[in-house]
Amino acid sequence: MRLMIALIAGGLFGLGLHLSGMTDTNRVQGFLDLFGNWDPTLAFVMGGAIVPMAVAWRLTTGRKPLAGGMFPPRPTTDITRRLVIGSLLFGIGWGLVGLCPGPAMASLSYGGTSGLVFFVTMLIGMAAAPRISQMLDRRAASA
């Protein structure tokens, strides 16, 4: 049952990304072009995601998911070196390519070669991230 719910939720998420234009790299890069031909459309998409999620965090407090398990804990609000570096790397990649992980997966069905190349390199980066993080943590501890 959980797998079916996950499949339906993932399909709806991908459909939402496609319908909202989040898989259109030109629209994403237009949103990030603050001093050029700025396209504010994605600001509304983000607001449409952030507001319901804020409500969901409130409603899930003290409850359990219908399909079992536990809801994830609320994210911390601490601004750490790791958060800043990760945000910078994410933003650079998003700005250069116009894709982030969710839209990259959603665009695999029609994204062509460039979408596939991005997706494969994204997976390589995700696999390398824990090792790089450990190396940076060791350097910081020894400094």
Image (cartoon, helix red, strand yellow):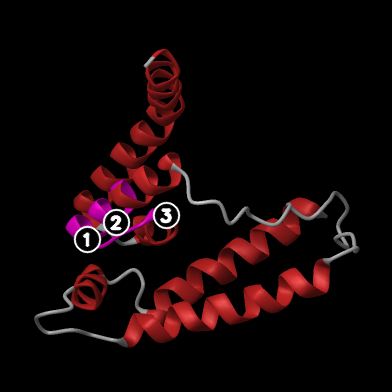
Instruction: Give the quadrant of residue 36.
Output: bottom left
Q: Which mark is residue 95?
A: 1
Q: Which mark is residue 91?
A: 2
Viewer-proximal residue among 49 and 86? 86
At horizontal 44% and vertical 23% (from top left) the residue drawn is 137
Viewer-proximal residue among 123 and 115? 123
Tell me which amino acid carries mark 2: Gly
User: Element under label 3?
Assistant: helix
Which quadrant of the figure contains the N terminus?
Answer: bottom right
Of badges 1 and 3, the one in the foreground is: 1
At horizontal 44% and vertical 81% (from top left) the residue drawn is 45
Q: Which residue appears farthest toward the top when viewing the image?
A: 142
Q: Which mark is residue 105?
A: 3
Tell me which amino acid carries mark 1: Gly
How packed mark 2 is, by other alpha carbons closer than 10 Å (few <14, some 14-19, many 20 or more), is some
Instruction: Give the quadrant of residue 9.
Output: bottom right
* Cα gap from disc 3 to disc 2, whole angstroms: 18 Å
Q: Position of residue 135 (x, y in %)?
A: 39, 18
Mark 3 / mark 2, whichever is N-terminal = 2
Q: Are marks 1 and 2 in contact (CB under 8 Å)?
A: yes
Q: Which SS does the magenta portion mostly show?
A: helix
Mark 1 / mark 3, whichever is N-terminal = 1
Point out the stretch of residues depicted in magenta.
89-101
Q: Is residue 111 magenta?
A: no
At horizontal 38% and vertical 45% (from top left) the residue drawn is 86
In the displayed structure image, the side of residue 2 where residue 8 appears, left or right: left
Q: Position of residue 90 (x, y in %)?
A: 33, 51
